[in-house]
Image (spheres, coloured by chain):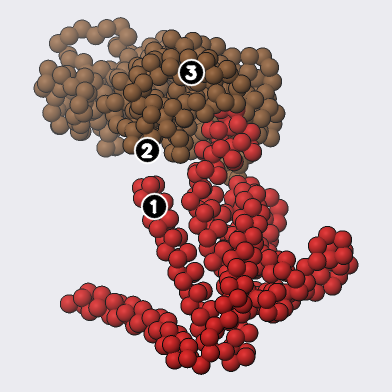
Amino acid sequence: MLSIRNLTLRMGQFSLKEISCDFHKRSYSVLLGPTGSGKSTLIKSVLGLYPPQQGRVFLNNQEITRTPPELRGIGYVPQDLALFPHLSVEGNIRFGLRFRNIPPPDADRAVDSLCRLLSIHDLRGRGVRNLSGGEKQKVALARALAPRPGIVLLDEPFSSIDEGARRVLWLELKQIAAELGITVVHITHNLEEAYTLGESISVLIDGTLVQSGSKQEIFERPATESVARYLNYRNIFTGRAEDHQNGSRIDCGHFKILVNKRISPRTQATVCVRQQDLKIVREEYPLRDSLKANVFSGEIVSLLSLPESCVMMFRIEGSPHRYDFELRFPAYIRERHALREGNKIRVAILTPNIIIF
Amino acid sequence: MRNKLFIAASFSVLAVLVIFFLALILSLITQMQASVAVRGVDWAELIFAVKLTLLTATVSSLLAILFSIPVSYVLARYRFPLKSFVDALLYLPIVLSPIGLGAMLLIFFNTAPGRFIEDHIIRIVFEVPAIVAAQFIVIIGLAVSLVKSTFEHVNPEYENIARTLGATRLQALTRVLLPLSRNGILAAFLLTWARAVGEFGATVTLAGATPMKTETLPVAIFLSLASADVHRACALILISIAISLTVLIFIRKLYAFNTKSHA
């Protein structure tokens, strides 16, 4: 298990602030955050390449804060993969074995099994310059795994691979990690990648670890407004709380949102409604209980068709804004409800799913 | 039309320069042929000058490269107090006149530490080692700047990777950074070697101009001109041109190969 405790690292204007988190043994964890949030700096500090000013790092309960990188036994695949251009594929994979005093027959066996596992046996004699993005990624992974580290840190390993190949590699990588029984910490800014791969996710924003938890916790209950905004949740409103028999009502100006939780009256509260938690409702059908509390009439301002979904901007009747809510729903809904810009419709919020910060 | 005029003008300037250089070389050859009847060449002295130049230039440039590797590594990879001052100090030999550098060396060997070196370690002033010392001081700045630039062009992530795979800093340097910088270091060696071959000012100040003792090619050219032996001076200049052109063409080929292999 990799544990980070109160790690603080200042680099010029940027700093990592008191980071504490755990990455459990044999788990596949994702460190998620926007570009420039300090993800790479954090893992370089864990690798021993950037010594922290404060805090401690433990690997399997042993402190490694001041241990040089070569003695930590942590595998690393950098963003640009950085395959050694002066060595062949096999030379790259074997590179780390010579420093670990692994007897040659064992080294041969390790290289053979990794090449088989990653399906790169035919590439062994080739130079690394002319490999495809996916092949390079596999060679970089084999090189990191060859000295048998207990944990491997992957820094945006799919950033240089095209979309189609990337999705195939996600599944392959997760399968390989499970087969080898290693702990993986995967860094990404890609939400889809994080959701697909991560068993647990830690969100780093502007040098601060904002939230850690299961992927459901992160995506369904973002802890802060900054996490919600990073997850692309658009409907975030701040207003004064009012008492209500079923919870509280947040006065957002020209509309009010009823939430199930009790909030002290007259305090400021921020709520977030995910795009998928806003539903189009038709007057002729009865409403589910979870939708009854927050129903709004208005018009469709715009509709944006994406390959698998549709994004709709909705303005509440009498609203001074161009639009108030953003909704996302499967593409077929557009045709089923004959949705057109300017149509008058009703939308309802799935009240139990409202996120309160 | 304007573009064509501009290109034609650029090519014309290039042609003028090439013709000027070729005319200089041709005048040397003509002068040699005209004076060959007057007196023959002292081959023994000429061969001595060539041998001494090649030997001292090779030793000094090898020493310069050996020193420049750790120095450039530190300058390219680390930040430390007074780094910009150290960097500027190491560039000094590139800017300072070689005669000034030679004079500085001469003065140094007249101080207590310099005399100690002369008395107990190696005799330098007006001896062959003085040539190596003079060439070294002139080329070390160039060597450091070239090797440092080569190291800076190698992604430090390669060394980071090597370290996470179990390599110490020294192993990361010898197994990753140096192999990746091989062509750059070789080019630095050839350029500093070529500069050392042509070194005159510091050499003549520290080693003097004693025929058949401290007589390198540039010193021999100077001595020939001083004694109005134009024929010998022409022969020596032509030899220098042949050496320089060979090295420069080799460096260009090396850079072309390097660029192609990194594309």
Q: Position of residue A287 (x, y in %)?
A: 24, 9
Q: What separation in Å lies between label 2 and label 3 (alpha carbons)?
A: 23 Å
Q: Nearest to the eye among marks 2 and 3: give it.
A: 3
Q: Colour of chain A?
A: brown
Crowd around label 1: few <14 · some 14–19 · many ≥20 (10 Å): few
On residue A139, the disc is none
Above or below: residue B259 compared with residue A304: below
The residue type indicated by label 2 comes to Arg
The residue type indicated by label 3 comes to Asp
Q: Nearest to the eye among marks 1 and 2: give it.
A: 1
Residue with the mark numbered 1:
B257
Q: Residue at x 47, y 64 (%)?
A: B247
Question: Could one spot residue A243 in this view of the protein?
Answer: no
Chain letter of disc 2?
A
Residue with the mark numbered 3:
A108
Q: What separation in Å lies between label 1 and label 2 (alpha carbons)?
A: 15 Å
